[in-house]
Amino acid sequence: FGLLLTAGILSAVGKNSVKDSILAAFKKLQPLSNQPANVIQDVENMQRTLQCCGLTDGPQEWTKVPDSCRCDATTTNQDTCNAGIYKLPCYDKIIKLMQSNLKVALG
């Protein structure tokens, strides 16, 4: 909640600078497959929770796409799942989450 509140306030004050900061931090972690095991585990947990794949560029950030990127192949929602893999990168999901909760966080 504290992180969401801070992100909400920061995004209200400097929307683009927060987006740029998150993007820069995520770019530093590429390629994902070369990161330490604890970072990979954290990214995979985030991917499962947010139903996304990769940090900024999608599944191609991985040498081998992990199971955390795999979605239900029978889903009819082609906006999020394509050929059994989440299409959206986590950056996009985080920004959408922040924007949708901005008013609540500021309130």
Image (cartoon, rainbow, N blue to C red):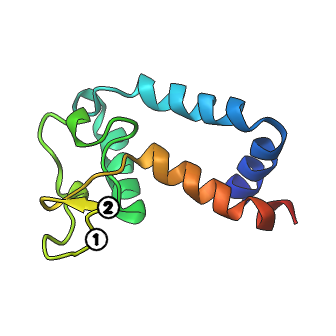
104 over 82 or under it: above or below? below
Q: Which residue is drawn at 31% across and 61% down?
A: 80
Residue matched to label 2: 80
Tell me which amino acid carries mark 1: Asn
Quarter of image, res 83: bottom left
Percent coordinates x, y for residue 9 in the rendering? 81, 48
Rate crowding at label 2 as few (under 14), some (14 to 19) or many (20 or more) other CA atoms within 10 Å.
some
Looking at the image, which residue sits at the far right? 107
Q: Nearer the viewer, residue 76 or 98?
A: 76
In-image side of 54 versus 105 (left or right) = left
Quadrant of the rendering where the C terminus is positioned: bottom right
Tell me which amino acid carries mark 2: Thr
Check whether the beta carbons of the residues at disc 2 and disc 1 lie within 8 A of each other.
yes
Q: Residue at x 65, y 62 (%)?
A: 100
Determine which of the numbered discs, if any, sits on residue 11 in the image.
Answer: none
Quadrant of the rendering where the N terminus is positioned: bottom right
In-image side of 32 versus 55 (left or right) = left
Q: Nearer the viewer, residue 15 or 41?
A: 15
Q: How many numbered badges does the structure rendering display?
A: 2
Residue matched to label 1: 77
Instruction: Label 1, secondary structure: give it.
Output: loop
95 over 107 or under it: above or below? above
